[in-house]
Image (tube, grey):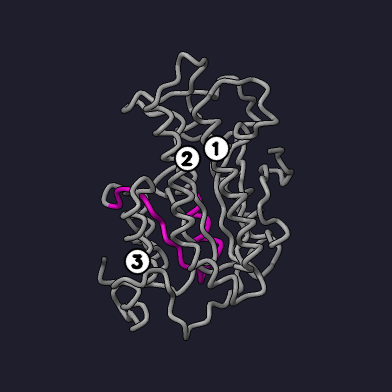
């Protein structure tokens, strides 16, 4: 943990760091602050982006730092030392940006990241799970065109990154999100980047077995989390977001047949999704939402 993170740690937080993890200090209220947004509404002031070293995750960090001049952003990635773009942003924005090591496929890494966040803030108002995998040259993972292309290794990697990791992050950070939601009239937001190809009823083409299945499983898990949040009055709106086809490394090999007006820049895609997240209330809890704010069938 950095010296910045260790400054002014309260006794309650020290207890959290020594075993009572994620239990935020009980004497501090987590009140939302006013930030400039398209609707001028009250918006969250603390954000965590899971998978922030490049692509859409990095763009989320950039836009949040720009849009909310008083907000604090926690940017997680597997190797902070190699995340040069995040390091540059940290030099520019100082203590408003905390770059934290988090490998979503490693439960102990998630727990350690939560300790670092708990040492800085008693709550989180928005968490966006961005990290995902479609193909990986290092392991041979690629979208399967037929049953013959399926392997145990490909399925396990797809589910580890696209399904299991994000929901474990949600489980670990939910107490910090709920603390914010219970202290405010607006809910905390727990968002996940899903994909339209994860829709079972909308699947008309087949293929991409591992990726489709991992996103469909994520959708079910998040739907369950949303129902639990509502039933227990946790004050957390759980959202599944389809960004459309975005010009990133993930989609690069498959952009040949995409019309220019359907291929979004990272800047546009993130702006559209942040608009959805900022405007979401508990009435949107559990929704599977496309970039244009329409509902996607399960």
Residue tagged 1: 215
Above or below residue 14? Residue 231 is above
Measure the alpha-carbon separation of dots 2 and 1: 6 Å
State the SS at label 3: helix
Q: Find residue 241 and report its image quarter.
A: top right
Q: In the picture provided, is 38 more to the left or to the right than 106? A: right
Q: Which residue is mark 3?
A: 115
- Tell which of 175 and 189 is nearer to you: 175
Q: Which range of residues does the magenta coloring cover? A: 59-80
At 61% from the left and 47% from the top, the residue drawn is: 240
Look at the image and say whether residue 68 sits in the magenta stretch. Answer: yes
Verify CB contact (< 8 Å) between mark 3 and mark 2. no
Which quadrant holds residue 141?
top left
Q: Is residue 244 above or below residue 286?
A: above
Residue at (37% x, 67% y) in the render: 94
Asked if residue 17 lies left or right of residue 151, the reply is left
Label 1, secondary structure: give it. helix
Q: Which residue is mark 2?
A: 162
Q: CA distance from mark 3 to mark 2?
A: 23 Å
Residue in view at x 41 percent, y 39 percent: 160
């Amino acid at each position: 943990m950095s010296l910045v993170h260790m400054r002014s740690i309260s006794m309650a937080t020290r207890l959290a760091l020594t075993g009572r993890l994620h239990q935020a200090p009980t004497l501090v209220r987590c009140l939302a602050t006013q930030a400039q947004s398209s609707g001028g509404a009250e918006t969250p002031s603390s954000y965590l982006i899971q998978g922030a070293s490049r692509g859409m995750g990095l763009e989320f960090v950039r836009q949040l730092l720009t849009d909310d001049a008083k907000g604090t952003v926690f940017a997680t990635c597997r190797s902070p030392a190699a995340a040069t773009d995040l390091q540059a942003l940290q030099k520019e924005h100082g203590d408003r940006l905390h770059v934290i090591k988090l490998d979503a496929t490693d439960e102990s890494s998630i727990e350690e990241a939560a300790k670092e966040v708990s040492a800085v803030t008693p709550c989180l108002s928005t968490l966006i799970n961005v990290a995902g995998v479609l193909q990986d040259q290092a392991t041979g993972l690629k979208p399967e065109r037929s049953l013959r292309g399926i392997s145990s290794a490909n399925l396990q990697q797809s589910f580890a990154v696209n399904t299991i990791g994000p929901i474990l992050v949600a489980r670990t950070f939910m107490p910090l999100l709920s603390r914010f939601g219970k202290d405010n009239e607006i809910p905390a937001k727990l968002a996940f980047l899903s994909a339209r190809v994860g829709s079972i009823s909308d699947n008309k083409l087949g293929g991409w077995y591992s990726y489709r299945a991992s996103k469909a499983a994520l959708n079910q898990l998040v739907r369950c989390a949303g129902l639990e949040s509502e039933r227990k009055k946790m004050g957390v709106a759980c959202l599944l977001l389809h960004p459309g086809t975005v010009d990133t490394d993930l989609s690069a090999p498959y952009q040949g047949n995409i019309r220019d007006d359907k291929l979004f820049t990272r800047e546009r895609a993130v702006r559209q999704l942040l608009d959805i997240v900022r405007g979401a209330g508990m009435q949107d809890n559990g929704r599977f939402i496309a970039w244009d704010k329409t509902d996607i069938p399960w």
